Image (tube, rainbow, N blue to C red):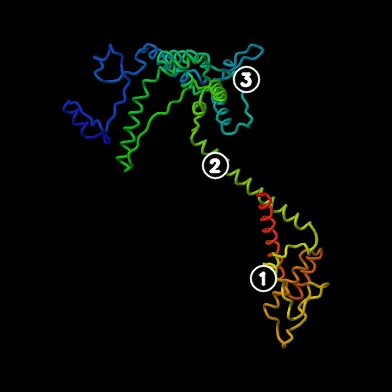
Amino acid sequence: MCSTPWEFIEAVEEEQRFKFNPEKFRHFEIPPVATLQYKVKGWGMPLFMSCFSQVVQLQMLDRLDEAVATDFIIPLRYLTPSTTKGGVDPLQTFGMGNFMGNVMKMIKEHKNDPTTWHTLPAPVEYNVAGGEGSQLQQAEQIDRRIDNLLNTMGVATEFYRGSVSAIAGPPIALKAFERSWGHFVTPITSWINWYLEQCSEQLGWKEVHGRLVMSSIAEDDTSKQVKLNLSSAGVVSQTTALKAFNIDPDIERERLKEERRQQADDAREENAKEMDAQMLDEYVQQGAPSQIPPNAAQANMGLPPGEAAPPAEGGVMPAGAPGAAPAGPPAGGGGSPTLDQMQADAAAAAQQLFASPTRQSELANMKKTNPTLHALVKQELDNMEQGIQSQALTQAKSQGGM
C-alpha cells in the first residue's frame, strides 16, 4: 500500500475506473480473434487461451511433481534389532528401553565424530523407506505437455530450450515460422519509439527513433553461398550478396580504394629508393676520383661551373696525406688559418678522400689530430654525395625523356 499511488486508492474506494495518460502508459496487447472482439472490449488475449486445457494439465503435472519432490525424494532411514542365527528374539533377552538409548547415543556420537567406534548389545539391521521419487516424477509428461502447448501457440520449442542453432528443416517451414510472427513487428516498433520518446523527455536527449532490423533465420550458409556464386557470375549485384553478411558495400568500396591508393604510394616510394641507390652504385663503380662530376665539387665550394678551385693560401696538403692538417699560417704573418682557408683545405681533402679505399681510417686519424678540419671534410663529403645523386637522377630523367 505504501508504494501504491493515492489516485488508485481513491478510484477503488469510489468504485470508479481510472483513466491513464496515453502518453505515459502504453498498453501492448495481443489482438484477439475477430469473434471475441466484443467480449474483451479492447483488452488483449494471451496466446495460450486457445489451448487453455493443456495449460491446466501442465499445471496439474507441476503440482504432482512438487508433491513428489517434497515427500518421496529423501528416503526414511531406520534401525531395528536383528535376529540371531539360533532364532532367539532379542526382545526376549533385554529391554527395548536400554536398546533404544544405546542406538540414539551411537547416532549422536557418530554425528560428532564419524570415526568413533561403537558397541551395541545386539546386532541391528539398517532399513530404508521411501526415496522412490525418481520413479514417480513425470518429467517426460511435463516436457511433452510443454511441447504441445508451444506448438499450439506457434512457438518453436528450440526458443524455449535455448537451442536455436539446432533448428533444421526445409526452407518452407522456416519461412512459415518467420511469417507467423510478422504481425508483431509493427507493435514492437511502435513501443520502441514510445520508449525512446519517454527516455528523451526524461533525460534531455535529442529526438531518437528506433526500429527492428529484419533478420531471417532462413538465411543459412547455403543461401549465402548461392548469392556469392551469383554475384561472381554477374547475375546479381555485389550489394545483394554482401547484405546477406551484414556488410555495407559502399563502406567496403571506399576502404578498398584507400588500400589500393596506399599500396601504390608505397610501391612508388620503394621504387624511387631502389632507383636512387642503383644510380649511385653505378656512378661510384664507373672509375676513379677523376671521373667525379666536377660540377658537384665546385657547387659544394660555391664556385660557378667550369672555374677551378683556388689553391690554399696556407699551403696545400700533400697528396699522400689527405688527412693531415694545413701546412701553416699564411705567408703574410702568423696566427690561426682563416675560415676560407680551412674550407678550401677541406674541399681539397674531400676530393682526395671521396674514392679512397682508406677513407674511413684517414677520417678517423683526422678526427684525432684536427677535429675542426674533420667536421668540414665530413660535410664536404656529404655534399658531394648528394650532388652526385642529384646529377645522376637528372641524367636518368633526361635519358628517359629522349
The residue that disc 1 covers is: 303
Considering depth in this image, is 91 or 203 the residue closer to the camera? 203
**In the figure, 327 relative to 297: above or below?**
below
Q: CA distance from mark 2 to mark 1?
A: 48 Å
The residue that disc 2 covers is: 258
Q: Residues within 10 Å of mark 1 (few under 14, many from 20)?
A: some
Q: Earlier in the sequence, mark 3 or mark 1?
A: 3
Tell me the kind of residue under disc 3.
Pro
Residue 379 visible, this angle: no
x%, y% of residue 268? 63, 47
x%, y% of residue 124? 60, 19
Q: Judging from the image, what secondary structure is the residue with disc 3 in?
A: loop
Say whether marks 2 and 1 touch (CB < 8 Å). Answer: no
| Quarter occupied by residue 193 | top left
| Quarter occupied by residue 178 | top left
The residue that disc 3 covers is: 123
* Residue furthest right in the image: 320
Q: Quadrant of the N terminus?
A: top left
Q: Earlier in the sequence, mark 2 or mark 1?
A: 2
Q: Judging from the image, what secondary structure is the residue with disc 1 in?
A: loop
x%, y% of residue 196? 34, 35
